[in-house]
Amino acid sequence: MANFEIAKNETLLKEGKYSNRPEDAGGETKYGITIRVAREEGYEGAMIDFPIELADRIYKKLYWDKLKLDLVSSQPIANELFDTAVNCGAMTASIFLQRVLNVLNREARDWEDIKVDGIVGAKTIGTLEIASRKREKNILLFLNVLQGARYIELATTSSRHDELNINGWAQRITLNY
């Protein structure tokens, strides 16, 4: 089964620094954890001092466990879903996964469609396990395609300064598999 530490370390390569850029709607962040999420999880200190131990707990609770990634046998898929959840939210990562699984099933010939509700349950995990044995590379590819499309949508429709973030966001899309 997928290993949290491996996924976390991969994400930390992208998210390890403190950031407080005016064009970033998330405001102050460290390790990819926004100040809003840190406060919701009880952290009261300055974000620049946000401890990695608390980031680990938040990563595990809000992203890894919410997506049930301990039950995923493909480490690359778990890494991708975890990283997308940290950057875009667990609900978004879940919806991306469910949509991809539904379009890769050859009109339900290989596995049944699942409900696209953003909730990862037994049906989503079971379907992912079947699908990843047959189409792991395509799952990874299309998860990245949806993530990229989300970034473009934000950059072209948002009243915020998301266009300024697009080049950095592009680094999140890993097509090296």
Image: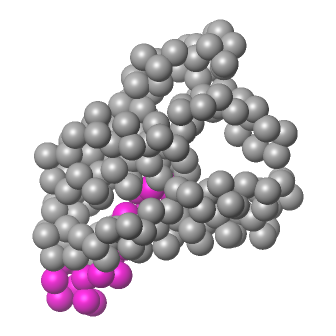
On screen, residue 29 versus residue 129, left or right, reads right
Identify the residue at horizontal 78%, vertical 70% (top origin): 156
Q: In which quarter of the image is residue 95?
A: bottom left
Query: Residue at the top extreme?
Result: 45
Q: x%, y% of residue 49?
A: 62, 13
Query: Per the image, is 94 magenta?
Result: yes
Q: x%, y% of residue 46?
A: 69, 13
Q: Tell which of 48 and 87 is nearer to you.
A: 48
Query: Per the image, is 171 magenta?
Result: no
Identify the residue at horizontal 39%, vertical 43% (top origin): 10
Q: x%, y% of residue 16?
A: 53, 33
Q: In this view, does 8 lie above or below 97?
A: above
On screen, residue 129 versus residue 169, left or right, reads left
Identify the residue at horizontal 66%, vertical 19% (top origin): 47
Q: In this view, does 117 lie above or below 146?
A: above
Identify the residue at horizontal 23%, vertical 52% (top origin): 75
Q: Tell which of 156 and 171 is nearer to you.
A: 171
On screen, residue 173 versus residue 18, left or right, reads left
Question: Which portion, as a residue range, is magenta?
Answer: 91-112
Count of numbered circles on the image: 0
Q: Tell which of 63 and 17 is nearer to you.
A: 17
On screen, residue 139 versus residue 95, left or right, reads left
Res. 90 visible in picture: no
Q: Quadrant of residue 48?
A: top right
